[in-house]
Image (cartoon, rainbow, N blue to C red):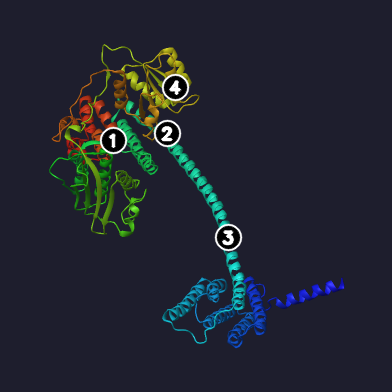
Amino acid sequence: MKARSLVWAGVHRVARAFRLRGPLAGDPTAEMFHVLLLVVAIWMAFWSLATLRLAAIVLERILYVVILEVSLTTALVVLRRGYLRSASLVYLAGIWIWATLALTYVGTIRSSPALVLYVILPVSAAWLLGYRAALWTSAVCIATMLFFTCLGMLGVMVPRPVPSTLLGTFAVAVQAILIGTIPVGQVIRRLQDTLKELQGYKQDLELLVDQRTAELVKARDEAQAANRSKDVFLANMSHELRTPLNAILGFSNLLREHDVSEQQRRDLDIINRSGEHLLTLINDVLDVAKIGAGRTELDIAPCDLGRLIDDVTGMIRSRASQKGLSLRVEAPPSTLFIRTDAARLRQVLLNLLNNAVKFTALGSVTLRVSAASAADPGEALLAFEIEDTGAGIAAADQASIFEAFVQASSADRLDGAGLGLTISRQIIALMGGSIQVKSAPGQGSCFRTEITVKLAQESEVFRGPDSRRVTALAAGQPEYRILIVEDQQENWMVLQRLLQNCGFRVRVAQDGAQGVKEFDEWRPQFIWMDLRMPVMDGLEAARRIRAAEGGRGVKIVAVTASGYASRRNEILASGFDDYVRKPYRPAEVFECMARHLGVRYRDTETIARATADGEIAREHVAALSIGLRRELGEAVISLDAARISAAIDRVAIENPALGLTLRRSAEGFAYSAILNAIPISGVQSF
């Protein structure tokens, strides 16, 4: 036992003696390099002694053995002092010198065992110093072998060539194994470690991707939920705002049918103008929200571009004249028929022209229209320029003026919500076009809009439907039973009185369940169905009525205050025959019933469309009250279709024939004809 302990103690002492000490202790590469140097040095010492005893030729080997031992010893000393790079260079240089001397001793590279060392050296360099050192070492070894190859090919022999012996070949092979085993093993180990690290990175990356994907899915779900909440909020706000507006505008119209004093009429005019203005603001805000949410679709149809331009400039000309401005139009002389959303394009041009007139005190406003051929022969590139001589827009404001609720900071604060340019840019973007502005303070502004449109034929252009003014039901018709299903009392009272005054029999149900019951008991031919009601909503009530006996024959029209016209298809697919938005107009109500029931009205006249020369009798317009003329003029200048329709409804109360003429002109967008028919005194008074 004592002897065994002594042996193990001796082994531990030897191991401690071979262990690397100094600054590099603990470095895996330095420790393995230290072991390599010791093993090679010990082998070279053993081989040298064997050579002295067994080899016949000794002196020729002494030089390169000494050089190798010196290089190994030097590398060991340098390594223990903490210089790994310097020790590596000394070691690599020593091995190269030893291999080169061995090759010189043999005299040729053919079948020389020293060649193995040239292969191992780059691997050792890669292990100790990196891939750049490996490249340089490879270059040196290849150059050395190429040198000896050229000498052999030229027949030039190195002095004292001696054939290699079996013992020498064995010694070099063993030395090559010793020198190459550790570097190759370490390089392979590094590769394995790298692969493990890459595998770990891959797993971490997969986890990170899964985590980010989950976060993106969560963010998408939250965004969709927020978008749904926004839609619900807008729908609710639209309903809550339009519902009382429907009552305000409806009752004010009904009151005007009675004998009222001039002061009361003026009060009703104020109520109507305020309500219409509020409705315009609501529509603008909803337009911005709907376009931004992608809920707006273009209604592409053939139209007459020349007529559209005439209508737009006709509506603006009166306002420009009031400010002493010259309105100039530069358009192609030939008529052009195109396919586009005429209402939206008209809205854009009116917004731009309105702004130009609003912010111009002196000078002129010019509308330039040009049409050029597009890449497709069936298309045209339209360009619209609206240039004014106003105050101009500072460069700092030119980007922000297209933002919602923003007006140029350099301009005086004027009426408006600051949505016109925002809506215009969004509409043009929907059309696939662009809008730019060039301006400088004191030099006016120029807005340029470009869109590509498809060409149309004149025969495709629709001139609009006939317009009728209802006073009563025509004789010889069956009794029409009309059911109103509406929970808001002020709303059903307006519709009930409107229909009863015309001669319809009317009943009211204040929720969907009561509406289904009334249908079963009374069997109406026509139902006005509100969509949002307590107990049972309009969609469910319509479904149950359709499922009941005789339910397929009744006409059901949805009435909603939702600001999203895109719901029309959804509502029609739910079993409704039509869709009317609040606040509805009397003309809309009667026209809808005539279309679905075939109702004929008494004292109704079909009026042909007003031409550009004007078929509206100026003397009839002059006979209207001053307040009504003012209201009509303001409505036309505001370019709000709902407001114009409401003003024409009031005109029709005083003069039904004139009301029909005005309505026909409005539906044909001949607003200039309406303005031209208003006496100058009436125009200047508002």
Q: Earlier in the sequence, mark 2 or mark 3?
A: 3
- Dot 2 or dot 4: first in sequence order is 2
Tell me the crowding category of disc 4: few under 14, some 14 to 19, or many 20 or more residues within 10 angstroms, Cα based.
some
The percent coordinates of residue 329 (x first, y second) are 16, 46
Q: Identify the residue position indicated by label 2 in the image.
A: 239
Q: Give 208 or 121, whichever is nearer the viewer.
A: 121
Q: Nearer the viewer, mark 4 or mark 3?
A: 3
**Label disc, if present, on residue 511 of the rendered structure:** none
Q: Which residue is mark 3?
A: 197
Query: What amino acid type is highlighted by mark number 1?
Result: Ala
Going 25% across and 48% down the picture, which residue do you hit?
450
Which mark is in front, 2 or 4?
A: 4
> Which residue does the numbered mark 4 point to in the structure image?
543
- Residue 358: image x %, image y %? 26, 48
Where is residue 375 drawn, in percent x and y? 22, 47
Horizontal and vertical percent for residue 613?
13, 35
Towards the viewer: 415 or 639: 639
Q: Which residue is mark 1?
A: 641
Callout 2 crowding tier (Cα within 10 Å): few <14, some 14–19, many ≥20: some
Q: Secondary structure at mark 2?
A: helix
Could you tell me if the residues under marks 2 and 3 are in contact, i.e. CB atoms within 8 Å?
no
Per the model, the C-alpha gap separating discs 4 and 3 is 64 Å
Q: Earlier in the sequence, mark 1 or mark 2?
A: 2
Quote the CA–CA distance across marks 2 and 4: 22 Å
Q: What is the C-alpha distance between the residues marked 2 and 3?
A: 61 Å
Mark before the other along the chain sequence, 1 or 4: 4
- Give the Cα separation between the discs numbered 1 and 4: 33 Å
Q: Amino acid at mark 3?
A: Glu
| Quadrant of image for the N terminus | bottom right
